[in-house]
Amino acid sequence: DNAGITRLQQLKTGRLILWSCEAGAILGKAERESQIALAAYAHDIGLAFQITDDILDIEGDEAELGKTVGKDLEQGKATFVSLLGMDQAKARASMLSEQAIEHLARFDARAEPLRAVARFIVDRKS
């Protein structure tokens, strides 16, 4: 159906994030355990990104977002918010962000920019 196809397209953002992290790890000749940690990080922030996108579609400011809010709801699309409810969706996004940060423990301070990205994803307004 249309909603399912749209959802799949949106989740491709997560695949792009995953590819970016995996490619960086491979090109940087990271050891296998580090590659696995970065892939887990990418998976979690990709999902947190999509959940936050769904939250912003309901609570976001159109001027900040640069797009119409409430379109998913009006079109009856299945979203994380419609499936989990707003409170649970927010809790899940935060949990995924924290979990993503935990995956970076092996990298010490070198991964601070990636930690900042994980926090930004759930705190963003657009």
Image: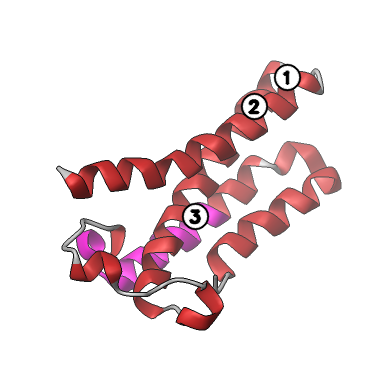
Between the C-alphas of marks 3 and 2, the distance is 18 Å
**Secondary structure character of the magenta stretch overall:** helix
Residue at screen point 57% across, 60% down = 121
- Asked whether the residues under the numbered discs 3 and 1 touch, taking CB atoms below 8 Å apart as contact, a structural biologist would say no
Residue 49 disc label = 3
Contact between marks 1 and 2 (CB within 8 A): the answer is yes
Dot 2 falls on a residue whose secondary structure is: helix
| The image quarter in which residue 111 lies | top right
Q: How is the image coloured?
A: secondary structure
Q: Closer to the camera, 125 or 62?
A: 62
Residue under the image location 39 percent in, 79 percent down: 59
Q: Quadrant of residue 41?
A: top right
What amino acid is labelled 1 in the image?
A: Ile
Residue at the location (56% across, 56% down)? 98
Q: Which residue is mark 1?
A: 26
Please provide percent x and percent y for residue 35. Answer: 67, 24
Magenta stretch encompasses residue 91? yes
Q: Is residue 58 above or below residue 112?
A: below
> Disc 2 designates what residue?
22
Q: Is residue 48 magenta?
A: no
